[in-house]
Amino acid sequence: MSSRKRCLPGDNGNGEQVGPLPACKQVRAPSNGHVAALILARGGSKGIPLKNIKMLAGVPLLGWVVRSALDSEMFESVWVSTDHDEIEKVAKSWGAKVHRRSPEVSRDASTSLETIQEFVRLNQEIDVICNIQATSPCLHPFHLQKALKKITEEGFDSVFSVVRRHHFRWQEVKDRSGEMTKPLNLDPANRPRRQDWDGELCENGSFYFTKRDQVKAGMLQVGGKVAYYEMLPEYSVDIDVDIDWPVAEQRVRRYGYFGRAMPEVVHLMFCNVSGCLTDGRIFLSVSGEEMVSVNTRDTEGIRMLQREDIEVVLLTSDLDPVTKSLEDKLAKRTGCRVIQVGEEPLDVLNPIVEQKKLEWKDVAYMGSEKQDVNCLNLAGLSAVPKDAPVAMTAAKYICHSFGGMGAMREFAEHILLQKEKAKAKMDQDRIDRCNF
């Protein structure tokens, strides 16, 4: 969920929605033939309308898997198959090619196999196809890399993803039939502890690699010499099942793939008061005193950043000025410096960034208006509230909350999450894997 600075297909590691990017160069061994990724994304989802481009953790659902496919560098081409104009637009902005499926394979009753067979007929050069589910946002490039090697190096014809489950299964019986249920995979008299039982492998639907001849023979998911690739449970998030979007979002924030680059760690944040820290309204009393409403969740978000030694500077605009007494009250309540900027905030903010010997990649910016666009583009992390359509295309993160109603707190949590991810990545890089 950015005129956007995105030179790599995985953006800059922030996990934010980003805009158009140039075609991505793919690096693959030519002896493998043409390996293509295909993501099926029909527009007629019955459960969640346009689910495939619904924002998840600041990124369209579709964007998570397109980014992983591109960054795996295992595919000659990455495609999205759709029948919907908006999905096509999002797919192209993330660097994918688009297969505009025919009406014959766009019906509610159409199967995935029919769509993939049509795609293969139209693209005769493809030797291996990987059907990636758009609803698997925790897919990482290394999953695809390791699975494809089972075809290219180990000689399998089909490879699909599985997850290990430790569920005891019982036979289903009809209600009020009087029939007794029976265990399917355990002996109740010798019920094993979890640590003593390997569990069972279940398809998780993340991806299916198949050679072209298997698709033509009608064996989409498995066929010929079959292998599986096991994914850890934390990466097995399927939005088709887990329709509780906030729960899925928390999982993705922790286990999703945010791109090749190190997640940005910021040391300074600029936040516009009007439209971000407040809802943009100024209340006038009978005596002429000006007042604004500030959400305590947002002020706590500011304190969260300050506790992590991230300086927060609040911005007011001379286009919509507030009184000096109101600025003083905001400064006292939040512990932040409050400065006034003009029509181009960069004129005031660039000297501050330089004075602190920082670069804009070290800065977070939250705005909501047209004059914020340049800063939103430059900042390492940038965000807009949900109700900021003018600046939305420039932001790298789009909040679920409205301005003055928790957007600042949400962005603060996102900033701190990136800091945690960067620390975890540095810890992983220090591991001497040769001496385990």
Image (spheres, rainbow, N blue to C red):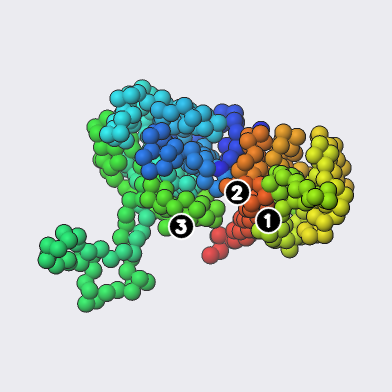
**Labelled disc at residue 401:** 2
Q: Mark 2 Cα within 10 Å, few/some/many (few <14, many 20+)?
A: some
**Image location of residue 205, percent across then percent down:** 36, 47
Helix, strand or loop for disc 2: loop
Question: Which residue shows up at 58% across the image and 40% down it?
Answer: 17
Disc 1 target residue: 295
Q: Are marks 1 and 2 in contact (CB under 8 Å)?
A: no
Q: Quadrant of the N terminus?
A: top right
Question: Which amino acid, mark 1?
Answer: Asn
Helix, strand or loop for disc 3: helix
**Labelled disc at residue 234:** 3
- First of labels 2, 3 by sequence position: 3
Question: Which residue shows up at 37% across the image and 71% down it?
Answer: 195
For the residue pair 255 and 405, the one nearer the viewer reads as 405
Image: 228 above or below 392: below
Q: Is residue 66 visible?
A: yes
Q: Is residue 77 visible?
A: no
Quarter of the figure with residue 42: top left
Quarter of the figure with residue 329: bottom right
Which tag is nearer the camera, tag 1 or tag 3? 1
Spatial CA distance of label 1 from label 2 is 12 Å
- First of labels 1, 3 by sequence position: 3
Helix, strand or loop for disc 1: loop
